[in-house]
Amino acid sequence: YDVGIMAGALPNMVEDLQLSTTEEEVIAGSLNIVAGLCAVLAGYTADKLGRKKALGIACIVFALGAGVMTAATNFAILFIGRIITGVGVGFGY
């Protein structure tokens, strides 16, 4: 889902935030890398907290990351939002 959304949103972000090609690539790939790494920890977290609590936390973290991305005015803030959202996606596995 994220890949499809980013394909449509990235050109506008590049224009609005004046991202370089490298920054564009980092923004596009960072969520997937973080999500993959956090997915490894998702099972452990679900075992300790329970599946419902772990998914609830994942949803809150995802929403927080989406809020940060929405408020982004430069590459650094957008990148932080993508990392936070990646954690939420990873823990949602």
Image: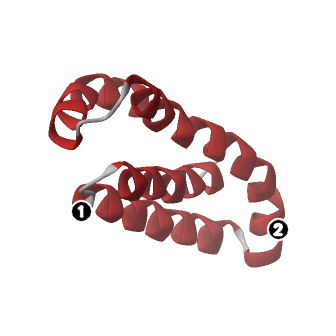
Q: Quadrant of residue 71?
A: bottom left
> Quick check: 57 left or right of 81?
right
| Camera-nearest residue between 76 and 63 | 76
Q: Nearer the viewer, residue 31 or 42?
A: 31
Give coordinates of residue 62: x percent, y percent: 45, 60
Residue at screen point 45% across, 70% down: 60
Out of 66 and 17, give the one closest to the viewer.
Answer: 17
| Frontmost residue, 20 versus 37 | 20
Query: Along the horizontal axis of the image, is 48 left or right of 3?
Result: right
- Horizontal and vertical percent position of residue 18: 23, 36
45 up-or-down from 24: above or below: below
Look at label 1 and name its amino acid. Ala
Decide if residue 22 is in sight here. yes
The answer to which of marks 2 and 1 sits earlier in the sequence is 2
Q: Residue at x 58, y 64 (%)?
A: 55
Q: Amino acid at mark 2?
A: Asp
Q: CA distance from mark 2 to mark 1?
A: 34 Å
Pointer 2 local density, CA inside 10 Å: few below 14, some 14–19, many at least 20: few
Mark 2 or 1: in front is: 1
Q: Pointer 1: what residue? A: 71
Spot occupied by residue 52 in the image (x, y as percentages of width and height): 61, 69
Residue behind mark 2: 47
Classify residue 2 by image quadrant.
Answer: top left
Q: Is residue 3 above or below residue 52?
A: above
Q: What's the coloring here?
A: secondary structure
User: In this orientation, does residue 1 appear?
Assistant: no
Question: Where residue 46 sits: x, y (%)?
Answer: 75, 65
- Tell whether 68 sits left or right of 56: left
Q: Residues within 10 Å of mark 1 (few under 14, many from 20)?
A: few
